[in-house]
Image (spheres, rainbow, N blue to C red):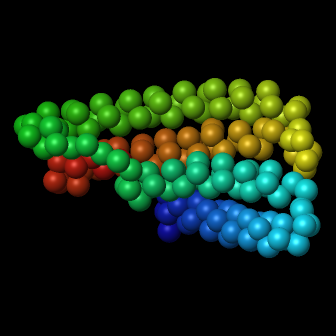
Amino acid sequence: MKAKEIIAKLLVYLCVIAITGLTVIVFLQVLTRTMNISFPGADELARLLVVWLTFLGSSLAIYEKMHLAVTFFVKRARPKLQKMIQFSVHLLTILFFGILVYYGFGLTMGAMSTTSSTLQLPMGLFYLAIPLSSLFSIYFIVTDMFRSTGEGEPTV
């Protein structure tokens, strides 16, 4: 099994854990509030899981090629121009995720000294999802960058 598939499988497991934990937390929070009981920190933990689920899920969407792509004009171009456009889109996407990695790690390190209000978790845990998912996304884009589907569709 390739490293790419191992990383994707890990992302799937992490997303399943996050959505399961989120479901349990929100269900218990709704159930206990009907009995006038509240779990301190449940909202905070649910928010943390939503953040991680969103960012890891976006990396997984890039791996699965489930992202939004507008190919109306690209399909009408000559095949050589299509490849150049696809390559340019890949480079711009890598640049975007590279910026997210750079500033995301800066934000994460800066927020590690601050703690969340209820659970007292480092706020950097919330922000760490940004650079990590961006690194995964860059990896998936680069590994597919030189492959072509043969239909003029972007591979990433």
Residue 150 position, x and y percent, is 17, 54
Residue 98 or residue 66, whichever sits in front: 66
Would residue 105 be found to the left or right of residue 124 on screen? left
Q: Quadrant of residue 110?
A: top right
Would residue 53 be found to the left or right of residue 149 on screen? right
Q: Residue at x 61, y 62 (%)?
A: 15
Q: Quadrant of residue 43?
A: bottom right
Residue 79 position, x and y percent, is 10, 41
Q: Is residue 4 visible?
A: yes
The count of marks equals: 0
Residue 15 or residue 89, whichever sits in front: 15
Q: Is residue 28 visible?
A: no
Q: Residue at x 50, y 56 (%)?
A: 60
Q: Residue at x 53, y 61 (%)?
A: 8
Q: Residue at x 87, y 33 (%)?
A: 114
Residue 67 or residue 12, whichever sits in front: 67
Vertical placement of residue 82 versus 13, above or below? above
Residue 63 position, x and y percent, is 44, 55
Residue 84 position, x and y percent, is 21, 33
Q: Quadrant of residue 29?
A: bottom right
Vertical placement of residue 58 versus 100, above or below? below
